[in-house]
């Protein structure tokens, strides 16, 4: 079903899946996601699934198109980065509540319903997954270099940029529609550091952010490479702070007023 048709049906929940060369994992992941959303239709409401193919060179798009016709497929003509893919999906989504999750879906999807309760019933603005570090150790195969790099990046971000949140990179987050449209309509970071940018803008706009524990049910396969991604991520974070201080990010309009201002 195309997005315009979904919009006419008043979508409750949109789930965006950014995918790059994900043919080896996407089939099982989408099957699992479809099974979960179908079984939990009463709790979730009408759900739209969106895959954003970020310029894949494998069979990612073909698998979605041929095997999952109920999934909306959006394609980038070139690889632009995970942040760009999530942004495209979030801004194309029609749901009153919008989530994104990783293409390999290593998390227990029950967290989606938990997040939705906070967003819908408690009227919070954002829910972010928080991985249990003790559980992460046996399930995730990481080299010592990746572990050290991850800790350094996390320490830098949690102390300098997004105080108090150590797991900014967890690949499961949910937003109210107006919040998603502001954050992703304003965001500029295309690479893996986009999560940091989104959370930084959320805190600067005094948005309510709820951390929700997520349970790993499969190996958390990351495509982040030390040499290829970490230095650009740090650069993106530094540029984020510079852009904000130079006034490149507009504040979110006050939802209780027609005048622009910080959201309370």
Image (cartoon, helix red, strand yellow):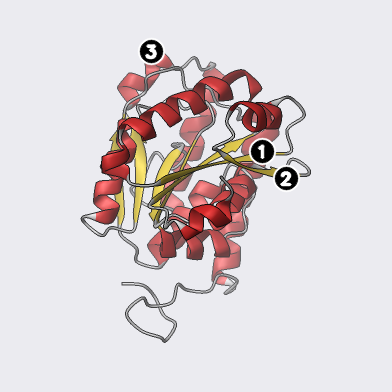
55 lies above or below 66 = below
Residue at the bottom extreme, as displayed: 259
121 to the left or right of 229: left
**Which residue is located at x 44 percent, y 30 percent?**
33
Which disc is residue 81 wearing?
Answer: none
Which disc is residue 76 wearing?
Answer: 2
Tell me the residue that label 3 is attached to: 138
Tell me the residue that label 1 is attached to: 53
33 lies above or below 141 = below
**Relative depth, front residue between 69 and 129:** 69
Residue at the left extreme, as displayed: 122
Dot 1: few (<14), some (14–19), or many (≥20) neighbours within 10 Å? many
- State the SS at label 2: strand
Q: In the figure, residue 217 lies in which quadrant?
A: top left
Image location of residue 153, percent across then percent down = 51, 38
**How far is disc 2 from disc 1 in space, using C-alphas?**
6 Å
Q: Earlier in the sequence, mark 2 or mark 3?
A: 2
Closer to the eye: label 2 or 3: 2
**Which residue is located at x 36 percent, y 72 percent?**
263
The C terminus - image quarter: bottom left
**How far is disc 2 from disc 3 in space, using C-alphas?**
35 Å
Q: Looking at the image, do the residues carrying marks 2 and 1 touch, with CB atoms under 8 Å apart?
A: yes
Image location of residue 4, percent across then percent down = 57, 57
Image location of residue 159, percent across then percent down = 41, 49
Dot 3: few (<14), some (14–19), or many (≥20) neighbours within 10 Å? few
**Residue 217 in view in this figure:** yes
**How far is disc 3 from disc 1 in space, using C-alphas?**
30 Å
């Amino acid at each position: 079903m195309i997005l315009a048709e979904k919009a006419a049906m008043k979508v409750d929940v949109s789930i965006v899946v950014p995918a790059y060369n994900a043919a080896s994992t996407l089939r099982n992941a989408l099957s699992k996601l479809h099974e979960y959303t179908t079984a939990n239709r009463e709790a979730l409401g009408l759900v739209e699934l969106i895959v954003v193919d970020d310029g894949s060179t494998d069979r990612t798009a073909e698998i979605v198109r041929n095997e999952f016709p109920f999934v909306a497929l959006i394609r980038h003509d070139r690889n632009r980065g995970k942040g760009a893919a999530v942004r495209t999906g979030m801004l194309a989504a029609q749901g009153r509540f919008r989530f994104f999750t990783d293409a390999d879906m290593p998390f227990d999807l029950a967290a989606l319903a938990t997040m939705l309760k906070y967003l819908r019933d408690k009227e919070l603005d954002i829910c972010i997954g928080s991985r249990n570090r003790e559980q992460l150790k046996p399930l995730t195969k990481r080299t010592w270099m990746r572990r050290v790099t991850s800790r350094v990046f996390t320490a830098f971000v949690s102390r300098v940029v997004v105080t108090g949140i150590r797991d900014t990179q967890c690949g499961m987050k949910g937003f109210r529609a107006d919040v998603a449209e502001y954050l992703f309509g304003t965001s500029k970071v295309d690479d893996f550091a986009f999560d940091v940018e989104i959370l930084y803008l959320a805190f600067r706009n005094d948005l309510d952010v709820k951390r929700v524990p997520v349970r790993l049910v499969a190996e958390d396969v990351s495509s982040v490479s030390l040499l290829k991604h970490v230095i650009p991520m740090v650069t993106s974070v530094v540029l984020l702070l510079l852009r904000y201080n130079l006034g490149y990010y507009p504040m979110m309009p006050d939802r209780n007023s027609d005048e622009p201002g910080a959201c309370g």
